[in-house]
Image (tube, rainbow, N blue to C red):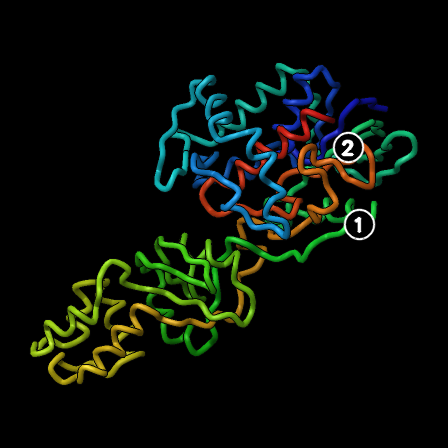
Amino acid sequence: MINSNVVIIGGGAAGLMCAIEAGKRGRSVTLIEHEEKIGKKILISGGGRCNFTNKYSSPDNFISGNPHFCKSALANYTPENFTKMVEDYNISYHEKKLGQLFCDNTSKQIVSMLESECRKYNVNIIANCRINKILLNTRFELESSNEKISTDSLVIASGGISIPKMGASDFGYQVAKQFELNLTEIRPGLVPLILNEKDRNNYSLLSGISIDSIVSCGKIKFRENILFTHKGFSGPAILQISSYWKGGKPVSINLLPEINLFEILLKNHSSKIELTNFLAAYFPKRFAETFCKVNFNPAPLYNYSQKELRNISDIIHNWIIHPSGTEGFEKAEVTIGGVDTNELSSKTMESNKVKGLYFIGEVVDITGWLGGYNFQWAWASGFAAGQYV
């Protein structure tokens, strides 16, 4: 039997941060990870270089049923706080773009740093261990695949269900249901979009082409690259907008954000250059050829009326696509939704119904944008709970 002041289930970013902070307070901490090693999502993040935070992180960069819930945690543990730890461990890093901070070398350095902090504060890490049953008497009693564990404070940091091949499961949601905590709608986020069969056939040959665009859904818009795939679209701008997209909604893509195409077409109205060749000056040639073939009757510019030139411009600046779905949790970087924030204290992450039960990280209904924001929520929510468990 293991007796511990605090048991944390989940050895990812949030769980490790919570373990460190609780350990600093002199609490006896046991961290349980069902995979063979901790930090697996950290290791694969950022192409193996871990986009560990975003220096511009603010509550506006998060999606939740309650947009105010994340404010307290994010204010009390900032990107500067985590960056200082990185610097203290002499891990070199750089800003890639838009405030995204990456390791210069490898994400293994971040996991090693967190492991070192856990050792420093005597955190007991048990990997390759599954929790089979949780009972609550005067304390939480856990039956695991190893041995029985008893604790005063139980922290669920088991993440969402995105990327199941990395070991993701619905464990945290099952615990919430066991203790009658409400869950919000759960769906894939930061995920590629799929086109209907007709559009897939039209554009599948463009797979691999990337174009700087503004992508909009409703009032939300992002300016980054889109990437054509065999099934539809991916790339940073598409992944961002996917978190706001729901079935049936159209998505608008401005393929030339920097220029007024209609003005340029008018200036060249008397030209004998064919539309496809004209557009090839602004786009990859393969894209110009396919897009013109599908959407226009390619002809020399002088053949078009002003109204037709306006229509060409409008389609390129406001290309409407109708996704038929997403590539699902298999390809989603995050899970949107989770434990309803109305069930938790925004200051401590403790359940309002069950004393001593905490939820942190991705299992909670807080989802960040692409670019280090989800890590910042993990650090901040783990830090918050760590002060109170």
Front residue of 340/119: it is: 340
What's the residue at 65%, 28% (across, down)? 18
Q: Residues within 10 Å of mark 2 (few under 14, many from 20)?
A: many
Q: Earlier in the sequence, mark 2 or mark 1?
A: 2
Which disc is residue 372 wearing?
A: none
Where residue 97 appears, as percent x and y from the top left, is 35, 41
Q: Marks 2 and 1, how far apart in space?
A: 15 Å
Residue located farthest toward the front when viewing the structure as drawn: 68
Type of amino acid at the residue the image marks with label 2:
Leu
Q: Residues within 10 Å of mark 1 (few under 14, many from 20)?
A: few
Q: Does residue 21 lie above or below 255 as drawn?
A: above
Where residue 113 appears, as percent x and y from the top left, is 53, 22
What's the residue at 82%, 27% (across, down)? 151
Regarding mark 2 in the picture, which secondary structure is present there? strand
Using the rendered image of the protein, determine whether residue 16 is visible from the camera's viewpoint: no
> Is 12 positioned to the left or the right of 300 in the image?
right
Regarding mark 1 in the picture, which secondary structure is present there? helix
CB-based contact (under 8 Å), mark 2 and mark 1: no
Residue holding disc 1? 177
Question: If the image is split into quadrants, where does the N terminus sit?
Answer: top right
Where residue 284 appears, as percent x and y from the top left, is 23, 62
What's the residue at 78%, 36% (across, down)? 357
Q: Does residue 44 lie above or below 385 as drawn?
A: below
Question: If the image is split into quadrants, where does the C terminus sit?
Answer: top right
What's the residue at 59%, 48% (across, down)? 67
Residue holding disc 2? 154
Front residue of 55/178: it is: 55
> Is 156 positioned to the left or the right of 74 in the image?
right
Where residue 364 appears, as percent x and y from the top left, is 66, 45
Using the rendered image of the protein, determine whether residue 319 is visible from the camera's viewpoint: yes
Type of amino acid at the residue the image marks with label 1:
Lys
Residue 310: quadrant of the picture: bottom left
